[in-house]
Amino acid sequence: MARNPERRTALTDAAIEVLAHEGARGLTFRAVDARAGVPVGTSSNYFSSRDDLFMQAGARINNRMAPDPAAVEEALRHPPSRELVTSLMHWLVQRMTADRTGYLAMLELRLEATRRPALRAQLTQTVRAEFDAGADFHRNTGLPGDHDTFRVLYLAMTGVLLEHFTLPGVLTETALDELVESVVTQIVPR
Amino acid sequence: MARNPERRTALTDAAIEVLAHEGARGLTFRAVDARAGVPVGTSSNYFSSRDDLFMQAGARINNRMAPDPAAVEEALRHPPSRELVTSLMHWLVQRMTADRTGYLAMLELRLEATRRPALRAQLTQTVRAEFDAGADFHRNTGLPGDHDTFRVLYLAMTGVLLEHFTLPGVLTETALDELVESVVTQIVPR
């Protein structure tokens, strides 16, 4: 396996682009090489198999979407109110919107996971760790509501993001920001 | 265009199988013919283009998943309580689970819609009509809560279904039925 870390990251980012633009079935070594503008055969030096390519793409998306720890610190300087939950959810939507390609690629990976047990195991672990970290953050920060509150909020935000990124014309009666506020108001106690 | 309606339905169902098992990019006339076990060239007599194939698959999934009107009538004989909402949501999950292939194919179509404007327009109309019908039903039946309640419930159930069908190992702390109950309890007033 080749060991140039910048090259590996660039190839993995190219794989994420291929996923979003051509779908999971389009993700081949050749498509990654073409998208990254490198000689044919390059990515086969960095990924041991297509499974490996899918799994490294999943890990990388997660990494790209993780919030900046300094910004998390900053958020924690506010009182743990429902308003803070609303700000955090706006921020989540902003991070996803800034990486629309990553969001769509992750949905492709979720579907591909129904066909690839190794990918399913890896994504389950990643998404579960993220869910658990969110639940811990909610509790430790003293945000209003209990574990059920957090879980239902997580599920409703999943719905918001899926609608917004795949069929943005469905819920146009309300602007995205207002939709997020409505979700928090309905689910999180004062 | 060929006009045998049973043959058209069988080919469209084969297209839905191809979508769920091979992804949107795998949906070609040849793949549909193979999946349906008919001679090569058959589906090109029933669909004018790949766009048409995607759009007819979308319309058919919607049709397959629609609740039986008699069962809706039956549900309406119960008082419009939060318990009735819970029953309706369990029933929704059962219908989706009974047609897992249709659910996964619809997710593939949502992703493909980000790349095909005609498909996006058609799916937006279909999903929006379904959302509006649900909102009207909620109001006309006198189910507890207002339009915001219905919308947030819709979004949270979208999240439940996405998690359950793509990464069922993430929210295993709670059985699916209990998760649905928790969603209704958090969102719908008594």
Image: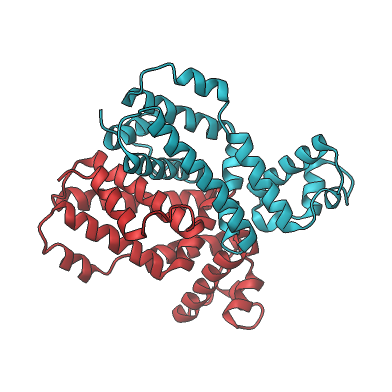
Chain colours: A red, B cyan
Q: How many marks?
A: 0
The picture places residue A141, in percent across and down from the top left corner, at 14, 53
The picture places residue B48, in percent across and down from the top left corner, at 80, 55
Residue at the spot x=43%, y=27% of the render?
Answer: B88
> Which residue is more in the foreground, B117 or A77?
B117
The picture places residue B154, in percent across and down from the top left corner, at 41, 41
Residue A70, placed above or below residue A51: below
Any part of residue B116 in sight: no
Any part of residue B182 in sight: yes
Residue at the spot x=28%, y=32% of the render?
Answer: B185
Residue at the spot x=74%, y=57% of the render?
Answer: B50
The picture places residue A98, in percent across and down from the top left corner, at 39, 70
Residue B110 found in image quarter? bottom right
Residue A181 found in image quarter? bottom left
Q: Is residue B168 left or right of residue A51?
A: left
Residue B33, placed above or below residue B90: below
Residue A101, placed above or below residue A106: below
